Image (cartoon, grey):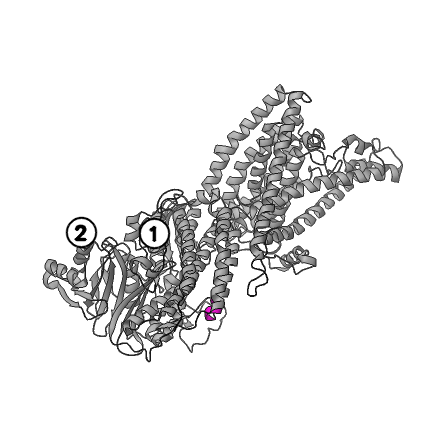
Amino acid sequence: MNVVHHAADRCIRWAFGVDPAAWPWTWVVEAAFLLLAAAVLLAFVALFAGPVTWVERRVAGRIMSRIGPNRVGPQGSLQWLADGIKCFLKEDLIPDGADRPLFRLAPYLVFGGMFGAFVVLPFGAHLVAADLNVGLLYLLAVTSLVVVGLLMAGWSSRSKWALFGGVRSAAQLVSYEVPAAFALLAVALAAGTLSLQGIVGAQGGWPWDWFVFRNPFLFVAFFLYFTAAIAEGNRTPFDLPEAESELVAGYNVEYSGMRYLFFMFAEWANLWIMSAVATACFLGGWQVPGVPPDRIAAAEGWAFVGGEALSFAIFAAKASALVLLVIQLRWTLPRLRVDQLMITCWKYLVPLAFAVVLGALVLLALVPEGGLADSILRATLVIFGAAVALLYGRRIRQTYLADRDLYRRMEGKDAWYPPYRLP
Amino acid sequence: MTPAEIHDRLRARFGDDVVALHADLRDPAIELRPERLRDACRFLRDDDDLRFDFLRSVAGVDRRDAIEVVYHLLSYPRRHTVVLRTRLDRDRPSVPSVHDVWPTADWHERETFDLLGVDFAGHPRLRRLLLPEDWVGHPLRKDYERPAEYHGIPVGRDASPPVARGGGGDRPRPRPAMHEPKAEELAGFLRLNMGPHHPATHGVINFLLETDGEILRRAVPDVGYLHRGIEKLAESNAYLGTMPYTDRVDYLGAIFANHAWALAVERLLGIEVPPRGEYCRVIAAELNRIASHLIATGSLAMDLGAFTPFIHWIREREKINDIMERICGARLTYNYLRFGGVARDIDGETVDMIRRWLDHFDPIIDEFNRLIGENEIFVKRLARIAVISPEDAVAWGLVGPNLRASGVDWDLRRDQPYSVYPELEFDVVVGRGWRGQVGDAYDRFWCRMLEMRQSVRLLRQACEKLPPGDFWAKPKTVKPAANEVYACTESARGELGVFVISDGTDKPYRAKFRTGSFTAMSIIERLSPGLLLADLVALIGSLDVVAPEVDR
């Protein structure tokens, strides 16, 4: 039972006073509610992908010790709107000799593939458009549509650089699908279901209930999935399909205006998808610490709304942290070469993924849940994970302090610009 | 060996084919008959006492009654130089090509053919290099007349911009610069234009690629998009009037071309520079070297996909620009040097500013290395890529950090000292295969990183030792007597040489610039087969090719 059906049911009861299960027109109302859900999701994608471009550019600005966009709106926070409007007004160019139908179709396929994934993403305790029982499978399948779109864009542009980008992205996405799928398979084994809501439900609110800390193999699987997802999202260090210094812009080099915007839209929407899937599968999803899910489900009225909102906030916070991590990676690392990319995938990630699945299976069979061994395992992993996070934070703080001292000597002397550093 | 001794050796071997030794010149030249030139070159290269392994430059000179071709040679193992020259019939100038003696002659000869119409017999592809293939005439000939228009585009000072006409069908289309290999040769390969506007080519250069998927079969540089004819301009400008043009030879290292030009003219005039002037020159040059290496290493990182390091280096370079602005009033094209000194003094406040900046910059190098220089992906992208052996590096005329990265211990600042470099302490950085092999792309990158530290050392010493006194001993007139001179400086991209011929007037009769990027560019075709597309980008970046320096 998800929030769409629930709302449709309540609406039928309230408006028509009939039992939805027995009423012949229930499907009409449900279809209307599903359309509404699609519109809400589209709005969410737009409202995420837009502002996150601004966030990314501001973070990049800090990393690069410059300011970033700060003119449109307070602190430049409406920059994405200006960019969007600009793209709308641009001429929609189609190169001479391009395969016009394919050229026009490609951006929609890419966007459709990305948007399709939002159907199964659980945003909160009941906030999911459709809780498919083959959720993970659907997710992997529908995002594969992106490959078709990218290849189509590269081919139909009638530009050799775009073709390079398209072929690179096809090779890359198909390859990295394998470790990603196997990492998620390990999760499905632990949860015993392919439904994303089911996977979240199998975890708990506290870190030691998360899958990432359930056993060492799932811990590895988390990083496996995250790496592969970055590669599937064409982000540095795996941004070969649009390597600007090699291929100019890769598959989208000939696109302009609105069609270009759709590619960008899909790219940043994908940022959310990968973070959301990683959160749902490994980091406990929307689970509220200390509140079992059935209490939220059983709540009525405002308590129910509050519970949903709280679960969504927790989910969004976890996913946003991952989004920021991906952004930070992008502006720190150089790019791999095409053969190194394939070697990384087929020689290291794929065998590792096999090992992870087998290891997770064995450990799940050997260590019963709730036993002493299980508790020790979880505690060790939680401490380990906390230590990693702590070190990461400390490193950033140390760099900040060191640089602050360095620049303090320079302050107050004219002709020296105020330095903008990563805090 | 002195030129006279070399002349004796040549005469003993070739007899009367050695015409004369012009000992009265600043750089004595040995004149040879063109027929035996190739044999003489081979002898000079192979004889154990001579070992001239480096062809510095090939310059053509129109003497009005004849065409002269001048070869500047240097021996790394024996550390001596010689100038060869040969006189050719002006109507049918022809001389044997020496491209099989020194591969670097390939491009030098093509350039000479392009600008003076000298036929190098035996050259495999004597085509125009800098000018378009269908250009009429050879501009460095003294009787050259500029064509009125080129493909309907008016040429010249008072030409009005072309008026757009409908359709454009009435105008002959320029022939594409792409050479046309036979169709069957290309079966199964993709032909690709990388440039003239491409993010990785560092300026307007075109690479004609033939690729098999991502693997390159060949990458042929097509240069000349930034050819501004600085050598031609120098002939019609006074000596000092050419100084601003030398800024534009290499806009990332303007001081070095300034310096080479000043050294050449000072040697023609026979004047000395006061010590303070020399120190000012060294300070400006080393600041400029750091600025240039910042761009080189930063843009290499950017070519490999890491954008942040480049911006960090731009931030540091901005401060060098501030300092340079205080020193000479300009931030990019400095025009700072004068014959006999420098244009403006470096005051105490500026020295203080430099010191403060050095204190700040030293640790920043470490930060940069933590960020990118020691990054595993970065190292993997560069190590063992496009390896240049020391023999190849010398034969193809690589200079500067590119040469030293290949393991050749040679630095003009130490080995052919000029200015006050002998009074300062610094180490010459030589490639050691830090992360892979000697002469790979990472060595070229790391050499530049270490050279920046040496420049910091030099700057600290120069700021310490800056002597009081005059900074400019201004000569009354700049009108050198007829002579010839070759002067060179160690620029950020290696030997930047100027070959000047004076004829007693206030304008140079001929000026030839020999630059590091020119030869670095010419080796790319040899290194490219088998590289990946992304490696080519790393190769161009690691060679630190600057387009205007190639084309001049």
The residue most toward the bottom is B476
Determine the residue positioned at 48% across, 54% down. Answer: B362
Q: x and y percent of residue A337 in the render?
A: 46, 43
Q: Quadrant of residue A280?
A: top right
Residue A361: assigned label = none
A274 displayed left or right of B392: right
Residue B182 point in image, percent of width and height: 33, 51
Quadrant of the image containing the N terminus of chain A: top right
Amino acid at the residue labelled 1: Arg
Give the x, y percent position of residue B3. Answer: 18, 63
Q: Residue at point 49% right, 49% down?
A: B366
Q: Is residue A292 above or below residue B182?
A: above
Instruction: Name the residue that disc number 2 marks.
Output: B48
Residue B368 vs residue B457, the one in the foreground: B457
Three-letter code for the amino acid on which mark 2 is drawn: Asp
Closer to the N terminus: mark 1 or mark 2? 2
Residue farthest right in this picture: A17
- Residue span colored magenta: B324-331
Q: Is residue A314 visible?
A: yes
Mark 2 belongs to chain: B
When the figure is inspected, residue B128 is found, relative to residue B217, above or below; the finding is: below
* Residue B179 in sight here: no
Q: Which mark is residue B404?
A: 1
A356 left or right, relative to B271: right
Q: Label 2 neighbourhood size at 10 Å, few (<14), some (14-19), many (20+)?
A: few
